[in-house]
Image (cartoon, rainbow, N blue to C red):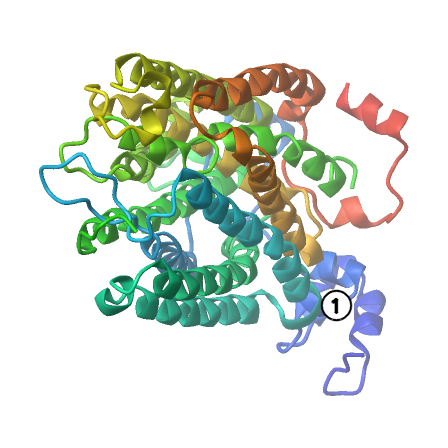
Amino acid sequence: MDIQPGGQNVDDSIASRGPGKALDSVPARFDAEKQAYEVTSTATGSVDSDEFPEPTPEEENTLRKVAGSLPIVSYSLCLVEFAERASYYGGNGAGAPPRGTQETAGGLGMGLQASSGLVLLFAFLAYILPILGGWWADVYVGRYKAICVGVVICGIAHLIQIFGALPSVLQKGTAHSAPPFIIGLLILALGAGIFKPNIAPTILDQHRHKTAYTKVLKSGEKVIVDPELTSSRTMLIFYGVVNIGAFYMLATTYAENPTEPLGCGGYPVATEVFLYFPIYNINDGGIGSVSSNQGASMTTNGAPNDLLSNFNALTIIVVTPVLSHIFYPLLLRYNIKFGRINRITFGFILAIISGVIGAIVQWRVYKTSPCGYYASSCDAGVSPILIWWQLPNVILGALSELFCNVTAYEIAYARAPPSMRGLVMAIFLFTTALSSALGEVLIPVTQDPYLIWVWGAPAVALAIQTILFWFRFRSLNHDEFMTTEKDYANPTLPAASERADKEL
């Protein structure tokens, strides 16, 4: 029980002063994350003052909507995310093959299925452990401490992997180099699982205004600062920083020494939306290591066979400011609402096209390889098709993430109670773990001569799912973006028929 310095209970103080003055009643040391349900939602609501007036109905229809500014502390948190993602991706570069050869990069040389198994196991753990990390932060330690613990664990993991990557260890063979790599991988997954569900909600928490308000720009124009646009721009910046960190993998790939291959509409609806992401995820880049394996069967001229995967991050880095400052403002200028469900649906369509292109490229590799439909293990040579033909697949997959994953981050934050934002974010991340589990099941068929279907079948499944998704959730394009404390005043959710009526 939290007592004010004068001896009054915080809950009693808030009750006596009323919800309109709840913020004034909270002492400086008050921790909103750890308070009771109603206290949390009240304490984290938007400040209503003359300085930030709510728009009138007429202003809602006439004034231009803009995104709010990102606080400086949010940029600092984005730098922490950059460092964590550089650690996450940078420690797993495959290395460059000997120059002027078509050999496959990699120091362990354990083959496609073993590589896919480790990649999928790592992804599964890194995206199922956020359930633990989000719950631990929301219930016990708070998101800031959880972020710090996650960073420390990731640091320990890299120290172990550095030992396993020493040339003297690699030269002794897989029996010596694989154990520290795998142990470091598992510890890194734990650190990422604690860190990742808490960083995005913490960044979004820095925006103090959860409802729209009006302000006058320096030009004299009166505009509406819209929380949905603010969250969207923030998550675009966040996702861009994530991929700047991921792009660090390119540096480590070339840096390695070449070696021989050894509420109503609340979080229940949000989590239902997330259930459509596992099939999408296996279309974004393919299952396991099939993309790198495909590249290894093509003419590389000494380039790492996983080089093109770095163009995923590069595409996101380049396109993020275009979407944030040109594309979305242009849509608003012409009064075109590109709603949340429409954005995700469009992203799904891009991923479908990406998967189809992957299947077509794999078919051409089979047709032109000296070993035909057994190109992955061909000792007679590689396909004359250049590895750069993988670029359309990679670029479209990256573009799809900017519409799907960024929007999902927004939904996870906006549709969760303040005391559960880490957990709801973890539920979204858990969908990647489900994708990895599905990929593990499919490992027996991730081999020649079935690789065309390994690309094509998920694209067909996603096409069917996309149609169902749009018809199921299209009404959410027009509902209120941010759930506030009033949505949680009654802990009992309305009946399904009432929710359906509201959606209609």
Image point (79%, 37%), residue name: 264
* Relative to 223, 360 lies left or right: left
Q: Position of residue 98 (x, y in %)?
A: 14, 45
* Relative to 442, 313 lies left or right: left
* Relative to 246, 501 lies left or right: right
Image point (43%, 21%), residue name: 449
Identify the element where label 1 is drawn: loop
**Vertical side of 401 occupied by 184: above or below:** below
Q: How many marks?
A: 1
Q: Position of residue 413 (x, y in %)?
A: 61, 46
Q: Position of residue 358 (x, y in %)?
A: 39, 21
Image point (54%, 22%), residue name: 458
- Figure quadrant of residue 410: top right
Kindly tell me whether residue 378 is visible in this rendering: yes
- Figure quadrant of residue 412: top right
State the residue position of label 1. 35
Image point (42%, 44%), residue name: 115
Q: Position of residue 4 (x, y in %)?
A: 74, 82
Q: Which quarter of the image is occupied by the C terminus?
A: top right
**Vertical side of 30 occupied by 203: above or below:** above
The answer to which of 164 and 111 lies nearer the viewer is 111
* Relative to 263, 210 lies left or right: left
Q: Which quarter of the image is occupied by the N terminus?
A: bottom right
**Vertical side of 162 occupied by 393: above or below:** above
